[in-house]
Image (spheres, rainbow, N blue to C red):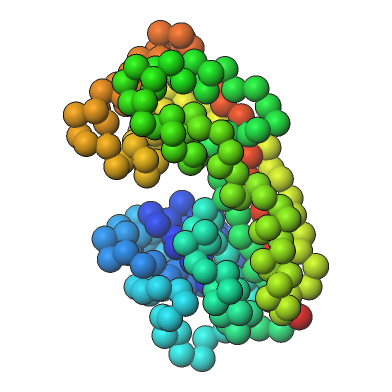
Amino acid sequence: MRTLEIGPGTGQATVELLRRGGPVTAIELGHDLAARLVENVDDPRLRVVEGAFETVDLGDARFDLVAAATSFHWVPPATGLPRVADLLDAGGWVALWWNCFGDPTRRDPFHDALVPVLRATAPQLLEIASDGSAAAGHWYALDEAARAGEIDACGRFGPVHVELVRWTGRHTAAEARALFASFSPWLALDPEPRARVLDATAALVEDEFGGVVERPYVTPLYAAMRR
């Protein structure tokens, strides 16, 4: 299976795609992330190409699968999806999925406990709706009608298959701190307030959740075959 991965980052999905299939061509926009990917994934079947997916030159390469793990929201669908279809062989598939750090259908006691911590240490985070935030309403990946509709509107794919994988994340205090430190709104904070709110988040896990917190997560997957 010849796979093209869009936005591989540090290679968490890349490793699994290599383990399950054949060669992977990974398109990474950031130079530093591309270098990190090469360091992290020692596999001769991996080819890393730097550039924007919409414009990068791949020659006459064609693929059986185009995959994007928590990255396709950076690609304009009006241009990105036709390019996906161009790069797929007949019968090839596109698979887009996102890990959502929260699940609006299930209770999340840690989220409820985190709100007053943010109010005391970084109240601006309460106003930003994004993964990991306490602000409600950011469920881009879970807007099934919009995400499937974009693929349908391209006109070059068959029926869109949607699957919601509900799972539970388990984090120690250090792991929770590292996870929140990776979210863009938290990264945008100045160093001192960022360290303060991250320390407070880790302390919350230790003091109120016995050192390990369990949270409801969901991964929506959108897949369709090229016509």
Q: Residue 99: horizontal and vertical position, in percent?
A: 56, 45
In the rendered image, the residue lying farthest to the right is 159
In the rendered image, the vertical position of residue 59 relative to residue 132, given as above or below: below
Q: Residue at x 67, y 66 (%)?
A: 150
Q: Quadrant of residue 227?
A: bottom right
Kindly tell me whether residue 108 is visible in this rendering: yes
**Among the 4 quarters of the image, the one containing residue 3:** bottom right
Q: Nearer the viewer, residue 214 or 112?
A: 112
Residue drawn 61% across the image and 50% down it: 141
Q: In the figure, 198 relative to 144: above or below?
A: above
Residue 19: image location, x then y, percent: 55, 59
Image height check: is 218 above or below 86? above
Label count reads 0
Residue 77: x and y, percent?
57, 69
For the N terminus, the image quarter is: bottom right
**Image position, residue 116 (x, y; %):** 43, 16
Compared across the picture, whether 122 is left or right of 227 comes to: left
Looking at the image, the residue that sits furthest to the bottom is 60
Which residue is pictured at 71% across the width and 72% down the height? Answer: 153
Q: Residue at x 47, y 62 (%)?
A: 74
Q: Could you say which is closer to the camera, residue 26 or residue 46?
A: 26
Q: Is residue 100 visible?
A: no
Q: Nearer the viewer, residue 147 or 71?
A: 147
